[in-house]
Image (cartoon, rainbow, N blue to C red):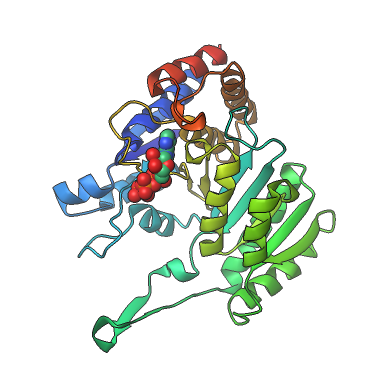
Amino acid sequence: MKLCVIKGDGIGHEVVPAAVRILQQLMPEVEVVYGRAGWDCFEQTGQALPATTIQLARESQAVLFGACSSPSYAVEGYASPIVQLRRATETYANLRPTRFLPVPTAREGVDLVVVRENTEDLYIGDEHTADAGDTGTATKRITRRASERIAHTAFRLARQEGRHRVTIVHKGNVLPQTDGLFRRVAYEVSRQYSDIETDELLVDTAAYWMVKEPTRFDVILTPNLYGDILSDMAAAWGGGLGMAPALNLGDEVAIAEPVHGSAPDIAGQGIANPTAAVLSAAMLARHKWGQVTIADHIEAAVHRALSRGEHTADVSGGIGMSTAAFVDAICAELG
Ligand code: ATP
């Protein structure tokens, strides 16, 4: 087994080594190789995601990705490395679970997974301007093929995890040719999973319920953009961005990637919460390598450490341990 590690920028350099340490403690047989990507890489090499990194990711088939700083304005030659990497590795499903963990900022009873389509929608990057920059247009692409495979992923996951309901989230009333297609295909696929209940919500209604009563959700099946937004909302109920794991999954490659970004405001201070990265690594062990016992063991160790009141400052509104001390606490719980 091989793991390609890409720390990226900012707190990626702090939380990714924590997750690698835990994986290596339990799976010493995993060979770790390192690839570069991100803003620093772009400034030093002119490439945000070098071809050698894509090659390493494809060869390893398992990737642990930290976070990259992407500027919020257009920079010639720069494109989001994670969006490029997802595309290059055909990791078409993004699984983003939010489960209650015992920290002051989490909401008891929440246990949901956002299954987000990862390859199309407005994120295909087909944008252009007219009227000397005063009109901007972006293409929203939804295909039957991508909708079908993400729907199968959602229903299979529901079965695997003993879940009961898949909620299709869309805006088909306003966008019948794109979201309407996604909805139609999702319902078609649902007929093959008669043991799982299927319902639907418009994305605005889903956002309302995510704020008002997140415990009503089980599996959310949704296109790329809505999945991006709803999973960040859900992350707030899980205790915050520092607690939210994710896995990009394709037929060949899987990329574990915490939901949070590079957090430049706290980078280099040794206070970043490594939980999201550690739980993302556990998802990789579970879904890519089939190491269910190891994944359970990591999740239980994180749970026990948090139950004993050990955590970083972000989940308690001010006082907390350093990244290093909290990782030591998790490692101690691993035995
Ligand atoms: P980027 O530009 O890379 O997206 P960002 O700061 O805009 O970075 P996030 O990194 O997602 O976005 O962070 C949003 C906020 O959440 C920041 O204030 C950051 O300090 C906090 N945060 C995110 N991740 C963590 C973490 N692992 N531990 C502690 N705080 C975090």
Would residue 96 be found to the left or right of residue 41 on screen? right
Question: Residue visible at 36% across and 76% down?
Answer: 127
Quarter of the picture holding the C terminus: top right
Look at the picture and state if 30 lies above or below 304.
below
User: Does the image show residue 59?
Assistant: no
Q: Quadrant of ligand 1?
A: top left
Nearer the observer, 140 or 86 = 140
Q: Residue furthest bottom?
A: 131
Look at the picture and state if 84 lies above or below 61.
below
Q: Residue furthest right?
A: 195
Question: Residue visible at 52% across and 44% down?
Answer: 246
Would residue 36 be found to the left or right of residue 141 on screen? left
> Residue 332: percent from the left, percent from the top?
51, 12
Look at the picture and state if 180 lies above or below 265.
below
Q: In the figure, residue 87 lies in which quadrant?
A: bottom left
Question: Residue visible at 84% across and 54% down?
Answer: 195
Question: Residue visible at 68% across and 71% down?
Answer: 183
Nearer the observer, 95 or 266 = 266
> Residue 63: percent from the left, percent from the top?
42, 41
Q: How many marks?
A: 0
Q: In the figure, residue 125 lies in which quadrant?
A: bottom left
Q: In the figure, residue 294 lies in which quadrant?
A: top right
> Residue 237: percent from the left, percent from the top?
60, 42
> Residue 167: percent from the left, percent from the top?
72, 59
User: Does the image show residue 86?
Assistant: yes
